[in-house]
Amino acid sequence: MKFPKEVNTYCPFCRHHEVHKVKVASKGKARTLAVGNRAHNRSLEGHGGKRAGEKTVKKQGKRQKLMLECSKCKKKHEKVLSGRTNKKVELKS
Ligand SMILES: [Zn+2]
């Protein structure tokens, strides 16, 4: 999917439409010692049963995420594109 490098869209901080720079958002690293991660790993021990967070159905694709940076206030917010694809977003000039 192609997406423009700059879009004029709503900025929740300025409460106004502003020109935004677009970047493909990358997922941050999960902290292995966080409380939730440790609790989840504890639940995976043992002999099975139902486990929260384990999916039986695999989706055909993922929803792509973009990071928008406002040109006026320089703050960032995310935009999740509708529709699932296996292809990554291409930023066209
Ligand atoms: Zn702004």
Image (cartoon, grey):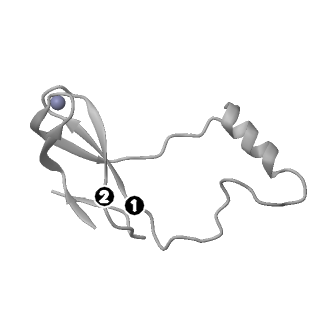
Look at the picture and state if 18 lies above or below 7: above
The residue to which callout 2 is attached is 81
Q: Distance between the Cα atoms at labels 2 and 1?
A: 6 Å
Quadrant where the image shows the C terminus: bottom left
Q: Is residue 29 left or right of residue 48?
A: left
Percent of width and height locating residue 58:
57, 71
What kind of residue is marked 2? Leu
| Disc nearer the start of the sequence (2/1) | 1
Closer to us: 52 or 71: 52
Ligand 1 position by quadrant: top left
Closer to us: 54 or 24: 54
Q: Residues within 10 Å of mark 1 (few under 14, many from 20)?
A: some
Quadrant where the image shows the N terminus: bottom left
Residue 71 location, quadrant: top left
Circle 1 sits in a helix, a strand or a loop, which is it?
Answer: loop
Residue sticking out furthest to the right? 47
Residue 20 location, quadrant: top left
Residue 84 location, quadrant: bottom left
Percent of width and height locating residue 54:
68, 59
Circle 2 sits in a helix, a strand or a loop, which is it?
Answer: loop
- Residue drawn at 13 percent across, 48 percent down: 7
Percent of width and height locating residue 88:
37, 63
Image disc number at residue 73: none
The residue to which callout 1 is attached is 63
Tell me whether circle 2 and circle 1 mark residues in contact (CB < 8 Å): yes
What kind of residue is marked 1? Arg
- Residue drawn at 59 percent across, 40 percent down: 30
